[in-house]
Amino acid sequence: MMDSNLKRDIIMDHYETPRNKRTPQSDDYLKKHMAADSCIDDITIYIKFDGDKIVDVSFDGVGCTISTASTSIMTELIKGKTVKEALHIIDEYEKMLSEDSYEEDLLEEANAFDTLSKQANRISCGLIGIKGMKEILENYDK
């Protein structure tokens, strides 16, 4: 279990210096636009595949601290994984946010959001980018 200072540092690091935040200059990415009805979160997810493997994942747009950081962390977690592995990671993240039992070791830095469920109004922030990734992965036809 991470202490609250480490969680805050991880979240702020990924917000201030998000990983994989860019719009690809190639059209061989599948993409999904996600926008919240009640806040500024408006991001597009991009995933490039080679067969069943995720070779690149990125995002672009505007988001709050929680949505930007969670999306940044998840891009790092699923890059290089198979579709099945990535969906498993996302499922475990969703279990964590639902306060269900989950594989803590699998989530690495995403564990910084393990108390997000205590702030019901912020759960959607922590899921917006991840839901976009999940939708692309579930609909991917190799």
Image: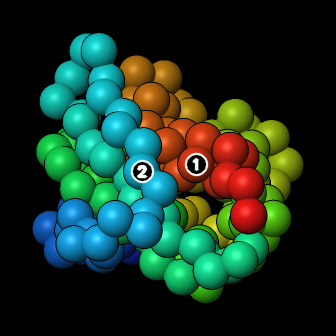
Q: Position of residue 65 (x, y in %)?
A: 23, 49
Amino acid type assigned to the residue bearing label 2 in the image: Lys
Residue 119 placement, left or right of 131: left
Q: Which residue is mark 1?
A: 136
Asked if one can make out residue 8 in the rendered structure from this viewpoint, the answer is no
Give me the residue at 22% from left, 64% from top.
Answer: 23
Residue 80 placement, left or right of 42: right
**Callout 1: few (<14), some (14-19), or many (20+) C-alpha neighbours within 10 Å?**
some
Q: Report the number of numbered marks.
A: 2
Q: Which residue is mark 2?
A: 31
Q: Residue furthest top?
A: 37
Q: Based on the displayed image, in which of its 4 quarters is residue 100 positioned?
A: top right
Give me the residue at 67% from left, 53% from top.
Answer: 140
Q: Is residue 110 above or below residue 134?
A: below
The answer to whether the residue labelled 1 contacts the one labelled 2, judged by CB atoms less than 8 Å apart, is yes
Q: Residue furthest front?
A: 27
Q: Based on the displayed image, in which of its 4 quarters is residue 108 positioned?
A: bottom right
Quadrant where the image shows the N terminus: bottom right
Which dot marks residue 62? none
Amino acid type assigned to the residue bearing label 1 in the image: Ile
Q: Position of residue 5 (x, y in %)?
A: 35, 68
Quadrant where the image shows the C terminus: bottom right
Structural distance between the alpha carbons of marks 1 and 2: 7 Å
Q: Is residue 15 above or below residue 81?
A: above
Give me the residue at 29% from left, 72% from top.
Answer: 26
Label 1 vs 2, first from the N-terminus: 2
Residue sitting nearer the eye, 36 or 52: 52
Give me the residue at 31% from left, 24% from top.
Answer: 36
Label 2: which secondary element: strand
